[in-house]
Amino acid sequence: MLTLDTIVAPVTPPGEGGVGIVRLSGPQAVTYLKNSFRSKTEHEEFESHRLYYGQLFNADEVRLDEVLAVVMRSPRSYTGEDVVEVHCHGGMQIIRSVLDMFLIAGARMAAPGEFTQRAFLHGRLDLSQAEAVVDVIKARSERSGQVALDQLEGHLSRKIYAYSDQLKSALALLEAHIDFPDDEVGSLDLASLVEPIHAQVDEMVALANSFDVGRVLREGVSILILGRPNVGKSSLMNALLGEARAIVTDVAGTTRDTLEESLVLAGFPVRLIDAAGVRETDDPVEKEGVRRASSKARSADLILLVVDGSIPLNAEDRLAISQCQIDKTIVVVNKDDKPQCIDFSQLVAFSHKVSVSAKQLAGLDSLCAVIAERLGQDGLSAAGEGLVVTEKRHKDALLRAIASLNAFFEGVHLSAPYECLAMDLREGLNSLGLITGETTPDEILDHIFSRFCIGK
């Protein structure tokens, strides 16, 4: 619901910095600035989208700071309301003093996401664009940032609106034939009505399926490096990271706990986990490390099973293999720089095998390509136009719309009454409206914007 109060919040992160920014939005934002801002340059009114240099004074005429101030007048602002930003020095005490001054003047502290919520309520952004604001801020790779920017720019919204327009046109024809006799509007050609919606549903299915890729881009993925001791797991981790992060020695059992590092691999944000070597042991510390490795194998999104290609597989290798889920495992045959003795018939169950030399940094590009394939890079390319669904809420809404349209097709096939067909189309429209915010309940809106930080 739109409100008439004026809100204020810092929009820069907590802590000390060169500059801190305090933002106000609402009908009194400019008035509050005028009452506290003193400039050496005389001016009657603040021009929109122009920086002014001056000083801030509180109600007791105590100088707070030397600042730059900008006014962005409605509707040409982020929220669609009058917006003021004060750029002060980035000390915590200074920002607190500026905030207190505006709060005493009558502004209200903004709730998390309230600036973006006002932008949505004023029609500056639809709901999918508003959600993308958080994804842009939290993007963990260049590719995930680009997908979020595409959504912020309205790529997904335009596609959803196109789907809705198609359904609205079909619904209008159906309702015309419900409200008026055939001799007034002519007969209805259901086949011509159904054909374009069939093509639309195929696109919607592909878009919903892109969520698997979108989730990885948005949330990242965990990759576990697993194998028996001394096969080169830590060397592989160091090679992928490009630095000596894990300790590498010839002593079996050097790694006794899980070691985790973040990186971007093939465009995907990844949490890389180096685990203790899997083997039977009486050492209680190493035994706990092996237990943790087995636990990580169950929860990891992808496993790199490392084996030593220069010697035959042994019982410890087979123990490591038993910890792996075949459908999420890539076999990495290490020490490719040495004569190979491995029997690949014992690894026939695994469809992906890559030979590398972690020590010589050979074969890593091939490994990264296979990882990218497993994570869904092909699906990302197939989606095209940057259209990737990253929110489960969007996927669920698409699936609901698809189910309604499939019910519509079934109704047409069974010659159901036009009223029933119209109901299916309306349900499809309502489901699509959940994505853009046209039919989203208030409690869902409040939950979505509560995920934002204060000041955004």
Image (spheres, helix red, strand yellow):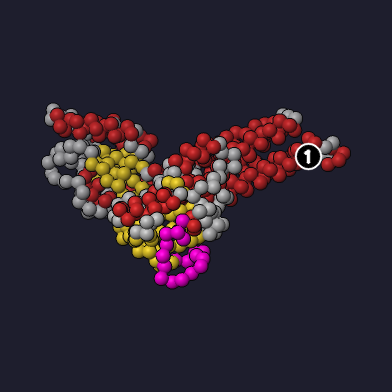
Q: Is residue 113 magenta?
A: no
Q: Nearer the viewer, residue 44 or 66?
A: 44
Q: Nearer the viewer, residue 259 or 9?
A: 9
Magenta segment, which residues?
32-51
Q: Amino acid at mark 1?
A: Ala
At 62% from the left edge and 48% from the top edge, which residue is drawn?
Answer: 162
Q: Which residue is mark 1?
A: 176
At 43% from the left edge and 44% from the top edge, which residue is drawn?
Answer: 112
Rate crowding at label 1 as few (under 14), some (14 to 19) or many (20 or more) other CA atoms within 10 Å. some
Q: Nearer the viewer, residue 254 or 139?
A: 139
Report the side of 395 relative to 351 (left or right). Answer: right
Above-or-below relation of 423 to 99: above
Above-or-below relation of 58 to 304: below
**Secondary structure category for the residue under label 1:** helix
Q: Nearer the viewer, residue 318 or 426?
A: 426
**Where's residue 439, x and y in %?**
59, 39
At 21% from the left edge and 32% from the top edge, which residue is drawn?
Answer: 290
